[in-house]
Image (spheres, rainbow, N blue to C red):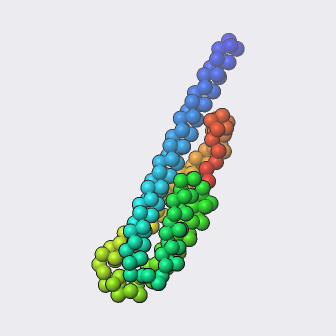
Amino acid sequence: MAWLLLLAFAALAAAVVAAARRGLGALQDSRQAAWSALEAQLVKRHELMIQIVGLCARLMKYERDTLDRVTVSGSAVIAAVRRNNMPALAAAEKTHRAAAAALFSLAENYPQFGTSAAFAALRDRAATLDARVDERREQYNDAVSVLNFRCQAFPYSLVARSMGLRPAAFLS
């Protein structure tokens, strides 16, 4: 009789561990999908900003440092994304947004850009991509929050350790 109880307990423990593994795997996949969506939006925005800088460079010859700041900060964002370095990405993102705002502010002083519907469309597209980046960042942080919570809760914490899962970093 005791061995039957022991066998039932072992089966229950195995079922709990299997369910926890599946749940943590699904949460890890969710976090990765959110990261991929964020990365895609950051890359799209970077490509758009390269086009905008190229367009502005033709007319804004005396604003080279502003153009360079946008280019360098955009490259820093992409480099941080490639390394999955959240603190560096947060800092680079802040710098990039400030540089892009400075560029658009300077562009308003040029009549060719102020009256151009094409440039206004590019500026609107950049604003749309910024909003999408913000949405994807929120989705990523939500996925990280759930994953980190589960990795710290029993019995998930035991399974997470055995799977080698560590708490993921938030993107502020």
Q: Nearer the viewer, residue 164 or 110?
A: 110
Q: Residue at x 60, y 22 (%)?
A: 11
Q: Is residue 65 above or below residue 131?
A: below
Closer to the camera in the image, 104 or 145: 104
Farthest right residue?
2
Tell me where residue 25 sits by quadrant: top right
Q: Residue furthest top?
A: 1
Quarter of the picture containing the N terminus is top right
Residue found at x 58% / y 47%: 147
Picture quarter with the C terminus: bottom right
Rendered position, 172 above or below 142? below
Nearer to the camera, 108 or 1: 108
> Percent x, y for residue 97?
51, 71
Where 7 sits versus 172, above or below? above
Instruction: Measuring from the top left, give residue 148's x and y in whole percent.
Output: 62, 48
**Residue 155 visible in the current orientation:** no
Q: Is 93 left, or right, of 127 in this rendering? A: right
Is 5 in front, or is 155?
A: 155
Callout count: 0
Position of 7 relative to 130 (above/below): above
The image shows residue 104 at horizontal and vertical percentages of 44, 79
Query: Can residue 158 be seen in this snapshot?
Result: yes
Q: Position of residue 20 (x, y in %)?
A: 58, 35
Name the residue located 58 percent from the left edge and 63 percent from the top edge.
Answer: 90
Residue at 57% across, 53% down? 83
